[in-house]
Image: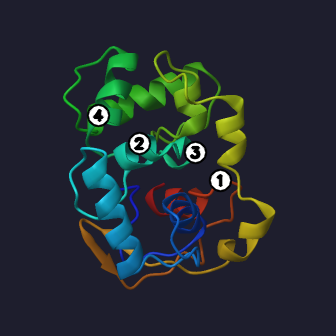
Amino acid sequence: MSILKRGLSGAPVKRLQEKLGTDADGIFGTGTEKAVREFQSSAGLAADGIAGPDTFTALGLHELVLLRQGSRGAAVKKLQEALDIGADGIFGAGTAAAVREFQAENNLNTDGMAGPETLAKLNGFAEMTAETIQKAAVQPDEAHFVGEPLPEIKGSDIVAGSAVDVPAETSVWGKVKGWFS
């Protein structure tokens, strides 16, 4: 799932930290978790300390939104409504198939995951602008994160793993998307 939680590191974490006003070292530790919980509580979100699509949207970090199988919440429901499929807020196999079909029809990478580029083509995602898509690219000051191995997420656990074999991409979620492709 495309979330940020304690134990992860990289460019998306650094961006989250900058937005929260915490030490932006790119490592999601207890301080970042506390700041996420406090923000979530103040924004009326479930204060679990895990940053996902709904937290990113509330923070204005639209470039970090990546919906994929296993994602849940308001952003997924909005995606399902835009695709004109059953909108239960749970990104399952049917939603992934609908996303792939939409991507194929719109000459997008057909990976079944909905990031800024896919969402920008859908009605109802006005926040996904050309500027948002540009922000989703790795910035020069984030380039050092690209070669860094990250832990792998399996279910709700972070396990030992390496993304070294995943090809570098220009998206801040590039390596993460590579794990699920």
Tag 3 near tag 4, CB within 8 Å:
no
Q: Which mark is residue 63?
A: 3
The amino acid at mark 1 is Ser
Q: Nearer the viewer, mark 2 or mark 3?
A: 2
Q: CA distance from mark 3 to mark 4?
A: 16 Å
Q: Which mark is residue 28?
A: none
Looking at the image, residue 151 lies above or below residue 111: below
Q: CA distance from mark 1 to mark 4?
A: 23 Å
Q: CA distance from mark 1 to mark 3?
A: 9 Å
Question: Do we see residue 67 in this rendering?
Answer: no
Query: Which residue is label 2 attached to?
Result: 58
Lower sequence index among marks 1 and 3:
3
Name the residue at 52% across, 66% down: 17
Query: Which residue is label 1 attached to?
Result: 171
Name the residue at 35% across, 81% down: 30
Tag 3: Cα neighbours inside 10 Å, few (<14), some, or many (≥20)?
Answer: many
Residue in front for this viewpoint, 100 or 152: 152
Query: Which residue is label 4 attached to?
Result: 74
Is disc 4 placed on a helix, strand or loop?
A: helix
Looking at the image, residue 97 lies above or below residue 175: above
